[in-house]
């Protein structure tokens, strides 16, 4: 199994070794090798994709655009300042709600939602809700941690069978073996990550 799959459940415990789609995608790579620098960079980006990342849909779209163009965009590793501020506000508002201290964050907002709007939406504090909201806070903190890989929606591109080309998004342009391999890799990565998050 290729190291590209290390961001997927089953990589470290060996269960992916028997996954038919992973085997087929790895065989596709063997047929198109050697990979040029841009193709390897795009596949590397797929290998860092995280379906639980708060903007996974935008990241997936960016990867699809890279597959279509054959050019991997530069990655800064930095979050835009406004996104970071919104994540920090989200963490603070949710933490304050859990601690029954919403007055401390009354002036903060997430997008167009004020702290009061968020608290009203969540509703009455119960032990279960506090536990659930704390899990969300943990995910937001992970997203803010620059040491963590970006935490990254499902694209139905994991099919490697005979009808796979018909399922590739038209935005990918011409159907080439490289694009088919990259799209299959992205689709299967997303599928595996979503499966593990619901397990």
Image (cartoon, rainbow, N blue to C red):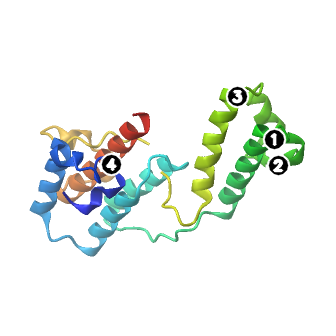
- Residue 167: x %, y % from top left: 26, 39
Indicate which label's residue lies in the foreground, 3 or 1: 3
Q: How far is mark 3 from mark 1, CA to CA?
A: 20 Å
Q: Are marks 2 and 3 in contact (CB under 8 Å)?
A: no
The residue shown at (42%, 51%) is 60
User: Label 4 near label 3: C-beta < 8 Å?
Assistant: no
Give whichever of discs 2 and 3 has the lower sequence position. 2
Q: Which residue is mark 4?
A: 189
Decide which of 87, 139 is in the foreground and name it. 139
Q: Is residue 117 left or right of residue 83?
A: right
Residue closest to the far left: 31
Which quadrant of the rendered structure holds the C terminus? top left
Question: Which of the two labelled residues, at mark 4 and mark 2, occupies the earlier sequence position?
Answer: 2
Residue 137, how many percent across, how many down?
A: 65, 46
The CA span between labels 3 and 4 is 35 Å
Q: Which residue is mark 3?
A: 127
- Contact (Cβ within 8 Å) of mark 4 with mark 2: no
**Number of marks drawn:** 4
User: Badge 3: few (under 14), some or many (20 or more) residues near its Cα, within 10 Å?
Assistant: few
Q: Are marks 1 and 2 in contact (CB under 8 Å)?
A: yes
For numbered disc 3, what is the local secondary structure?
A: helix
Between residues 64 and 13, which one lies in front from this camera angle?
13
Q: Earlier in the sequence, mark 1 or mark 2?
A: 2
- Residue wearing tag 2: 108
Q: Residue at x 43, y 68 (%)?
A: 73
Relative to 170, is 78 on the left or the right? right
Q: What is the spatial separation of the Cα atoms under label 1 and label 2, in whole angstroms?
A: 6 Å
* Circle 1 residues within 10 Å: few <14, some 14–19, many ≥20: many
Q: Which residue is mark 1?
A: 115
Callout 2 crowding tier (Cα within 10 Å): few <14, some 14–19, many ≥20: some
């Amino acid at each position: 199994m290729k190291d590209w799959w290390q961001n997927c459940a089953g990589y470290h415990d060996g269960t992916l070794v028997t996954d038919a789609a992973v085997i087929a995608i790895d065989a596709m790579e063997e047929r198109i090798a050697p990979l040029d620098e841009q193709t390897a960079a795009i596949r590397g980006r797929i290998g860092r994709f995280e379906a639980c990342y708060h903007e996974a849909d935008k990241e997936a779209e960016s990867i699809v655009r890279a597959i279509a163009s054959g050019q991997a965009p530069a990655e800064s590793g930095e979050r835009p300042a406004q996104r970071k501020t919104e994540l920090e506000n989200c963490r603070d508002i949710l933490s304050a709600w859990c601690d029954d201290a919403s007055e401390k964050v009354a002036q903060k907002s997430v997008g167009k939602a004020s702290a009061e709007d968020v608290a009203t939406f969540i509703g009455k504090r119960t032990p279960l809700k506090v536990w659930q909201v704390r899990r969300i806070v943990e995910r937001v903190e992970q997203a803010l941690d620059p040491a963590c890989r970006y935490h990254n929606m499902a694209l139905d591109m994991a099919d490697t069978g005979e009808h796979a080309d018909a399922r590739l998004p038209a935005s990918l342009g011409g159907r080439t073996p490289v694009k088919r391999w990259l799209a299959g890799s992205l689709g299967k990565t997303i599928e595996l990550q979503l499966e593990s998050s619901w397990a």
